[in-house]
Image (cartoon, coloured by chain):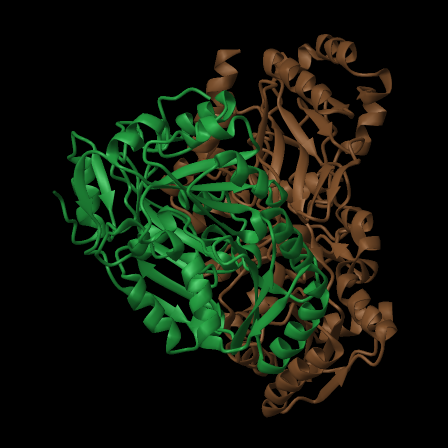
Chain colours: A brown, B green
Amino acid sequence: MEMPNPNPHVLARKARVVERLLRVLPKDAVISDVAETRAYECDALTAYKCPPMVAVLPATTAEVSDVLRICHEEGVPVVPRGSGTSLAGGALPTADCVILGVARMNEVLETDYDNRIVRVQSGRTNLSVTGAVEDNDFFYAPDPSSQLACAIAGNVAMNSGGAHCLKYGVTTNNLLGVTLVQMDGTVVEIGGAHLDAGGLDLLGLICGSEGQLGVVTEATLRILRKPEGARPVLIGYDSNEVAGACVSDIIRAGVLPVAIEFMDRLCIETCENFAGAGYPMCEALLIVEVEGSPEEIDAQLALITDIARRHNPVDLREARDADEAGRIWLGRKSAFGAMGQINDYMCLDGTIPVSALPTVLRRIGELSKEYGLDVANVFHAGDGNMHPLILFDANKPGDLETCEAMGAEILKLCVEVGGCLTGEHGVGIEKRDLMLHQYSQVDLEAQMLVKDVFDQQWLLNPAKVFPLTVSQSRRTEVLAAQ
Amino acid sequence: MKTPQSEADLADIIKGANAPFALRGGGTRGIPAHGTPLHLGSLTGVTLYEPGALTLVARTGTAMAEIERVLAAENQRLAFEPMDHRGLLGTDGEPTIGGVVAGNVSGPRRIQAGACRDFLLGVRFVDGSGTVIKNGGRVMKNVTGYDLVKLMAGSWGTLGVLTEVSLKVLPTAETEATLSVQVPSATDAVRVMSSALGSPFDVTGAAYRPDQGDAVIRIEGFNDSVRYRTGKLKDLLGGFGRVDANGDPEASAQIWRDIRDVAAFHDAPGDVWRVSVKPTDGPDVMSRADGEGALMDWGGGLVWLRLLPGTDLRARLGAFDGHATLVRANADTHARLGTFQPEPAALRSLSRGLRERFDPRGLFNPGLMETAVEA
C-alpha cells in the first residue's frame, strides 16, 4: 500500500509542534515519545502500520480547536481517530502526522426522551450510547459488530451500519446534529434536535466523509423506544442460490424484518464452535429477526417460515427463549473474531443489488479456487451488504498480496453487477486505489471539491479515500506552499 | 425558455449558457427563482425497477403520478410520503420526482421512516460547467466516497441539475388506522404525541390539528398488528383526553393526505411558513408566531403557520433552534424576507463555498438559498 512520503519540513518541526501543543493541552494528553506513539500505529486493518509523529488526546471541543489551529498554522497533517476499530485503515497514521484521538471525550451531555434524542461527546462508544438510555427502554439503532469498542466519532466518519439497519437505517439516518471543528479551528454547529437541518445538507455530507472535512466532537443522535420483543428464526438451505431467492421473496412479500443475515458453511462451523448457538450445519444459513409483541412476532414469523418452506429448507428453527436468541446473535456478531482465532483474514464489505446475490456468490467461489484461498461469507443479506472473509496466512510470503489481489477482484465484481466497493466500513486506504473502478475521474473531482471547501490545504486525513494519483496535485500544492 | 430532451442535450445547453436559469420540474412548488426557465419535464421514464431489491431508478422529469402507478402495481410506495403542493399554492401541472428530491420533500411518515434524503440512493446531475456527475448508486448501503447524494437532496437546484435519481422503496402497509385524542392545547398535543412516539407501537404519523382540537396518531401494518397496537395506544393515551379510533383505512388515509398537503390552509388567505424545530419547542413557536392558523406535524417538530401577508415571521420568533421557510407568499415578500432561514456566518461560508465550486458561474436558481438578510 503506497502512502505519501513524510514531509521532511514537518518532521523537522516536531519539537516546536510538540511545544506548542503542550501549551494548550495537559502534559499527559500529548504523546510524542517514539515508543509510546506506537500504540497509535494502526487501526483494525493491522496489515499496515506507521507510528505517528505525535498523538494528542484532547478532552474538550475547545482543546480540539486549539490542536487543529496549531496544526493548521504549522502545516501538519492530522489523522482523527475514534477507537481505532476501522477495518479500512481510516485511522492509519503517516509518519508526519498528529493523531487526534477523541477517546477522552465520552460524556453523555443531554438525554431527552420527550424529543427522543441524546447528545454525546464523540469518543463515547456505540454500545454505551444505548447503555445510557436502556433503563428507560430506549436504544440507539445503528449496531456495528464492533459496537462494544467503536466510537460515535468513527461511526459518523464512516457512516457505520450494522445488522439491524435493514429496518432502522445506518448512522446518517440516525444523526441529527454535530459539533464540527474545522481544520483552521473554527467550531460550527450543524443541525440539532430538530429533524431536518436547514440549508444545504452539510450533515449528510459530513457523515461518511472519513474524517477529511473536520473533527466531530459532539453528536445529537436519534434514540428509539425498544420494541416489545424480538425473535430470530434460523433457516438452513443446501445452496446459496436458494437462500438468496428466499431473501428476495421475503422482501417482496411486504414484511420488513429488522435483520436478514446470511452465513455460508465455513462461517457457520466457525461461529458454532465459538458461540454454541445451535446453528444447523448446511451450505447457507439465514438469520431472520422480527420485532413486536409476542402475537405480532408469531404472525410475521408465520409469514416468513411459510415463504422459507416453499424453498425446501434443510432446517428451520425459531429461537426458543431469550438465551437462545442471544446466542444466535452472539455467534453472528462474533463471526469476525471467531474467524480471527483460526486464521488471518481480510474482510471486504462490497454491496450488491439483492437480485445479484446468487451470481456473486458463485463467482466468489470460482475466484476462491483460482487464487487458492478460502472464503467465508457472512453478510447482511437484506440490503445486499456482503462480507466475504478471505483467509490467508500472514506469515507466508506473498499470501497477503494474493489475498489483496483476490479482494480487489471481488470488489470489482460487486461494482460490475451494479453495487459498490464498500457498504459500511469506508474506503480508507483499503479501497482507495479501487475508487476509479466505481467512479470516473470527473465524479471524484466533484467529491474533492467538497474537501477543498472544508480543508483548503488538504491537511485532514489527506492520503485516504482518493487514489493518490488523483489527489496528488492538491496535496503537492500544499507542500509547495510550505 | 429551454427544454432539454436528454442529459447530453442539457449538458450542452449549460456549457453554452451565459445567463442564469430558473430550474423547473412540474412547476408546482412555487420556487421563486429568477432566470431563463429551464424545463426538465422532458427527461422522463422509470429506467429500472426491482421490487425484490426495493429499488427504483427514474429520470428526474418523471411525473410523481407515473412513479406512484408503477410502484402501486407491486404494492410498494415511496415511504417518505412527499407532499403535493398544488392545493396549498394553487399551482397546476404535474409534480415530478426531480422536484421532490431537489426540495427533500417529505411528509408525515418522516418521523418514522425518514425523509426523502434517507431514501435517495444515487444521483446523476449536471454541474455548472456542463459536466455530468454521478454519485451513490442503487444499493441500500453505500459509503464509497463522499455522500453527494444527500447534498443534492434539498439543494433546490442550486448545485446542479438532477437528471436521474435512484430511490429505495418500501412495501405498502396492508392497512392503517388513526386515533384522535381531544386536547385543550398545543402543549397537551405534544405530550400526547411524545407519549405515542416514545411507545413501542411503531407510530407512523403524529400531528396536531388546532382547528379540530385533536392530536392524531397513525398506525400502519398488517391487520392484526394494527388492531393490537391501536388498542394499546388507546389505553396509553386515554389519560390525556377522549380517544376515538378511526379504523377505516380510506378515512385514515384521507386524514394524513390532508395533513401532508396542509389542506387546512388551502382556501384560507395569507402567507404560509414551515418551521422545523425540536418537537417540544413547537407550542412555543406557535404562540410566538401569533398567526391566523397553525398545524403541527412530526410530533410537534414541523409547524405550519398561516400569517397575514408580508409578516416577518423570523422577526417574531427571534433567535430559536431550528429554521423557518417561506412556502407561500407573493414575489415581493419572498424577495424582501428571503425564502430560507439565513445561516450563521460559519455555515454560510461553507454553503457559499460549495455553490461557488459546483456552480461557479451562478447559473442555477441564483440567490435562492442565500438571502441578503444577515443572520
Which quadrant of the structure image shows residue B17? top left
Vertical order, A41 against B108 (above or below): above
Residue A428 showing in the rendered view: no
Judge left or right: residue B195 versus residue A436: right
Q: Is residue A63 left or right of residue A175?
A: right
Q: Quarter of the image holding residue A295?
A: bottom right
Question: Dividing the image into 4 quarters, which one contains the N terminus of chain B?
Answer: top left
Image location of residue B71, percent across then percent down: 38, 72
**Residue B98, relative to residue A377: is it above or below?**
above
Left or right of B102: which side holds A243?
right
Which residue is rendered at x = 17% and y = 30% of the image?
Answer: B19
Residue A233 against residue A45 in the figure, above or below: below
Query: What x and y, as percent, mark residue B144?
Result: 52, 48
Residue A395 appears in the figure: yes
**Residue A381 place in picture, x, y as percent:** 60, 69
Q: Nearer the viewer, residue A77 or B360?
A: B360
> Is A445 drawn above or below residue B302 in the view shown?
above
Identity of the residue furthest to the left in this view: B1
- Residue A399 lies, in percent from the top left, at 68, 54
Residue A71 or residue A173, whichever sits in front: A173
Q: For the point 66% across and 38% down, which residue is it? A: A219
Please give left or right for residue B88 compared with residue B313 in the image. Answer: left
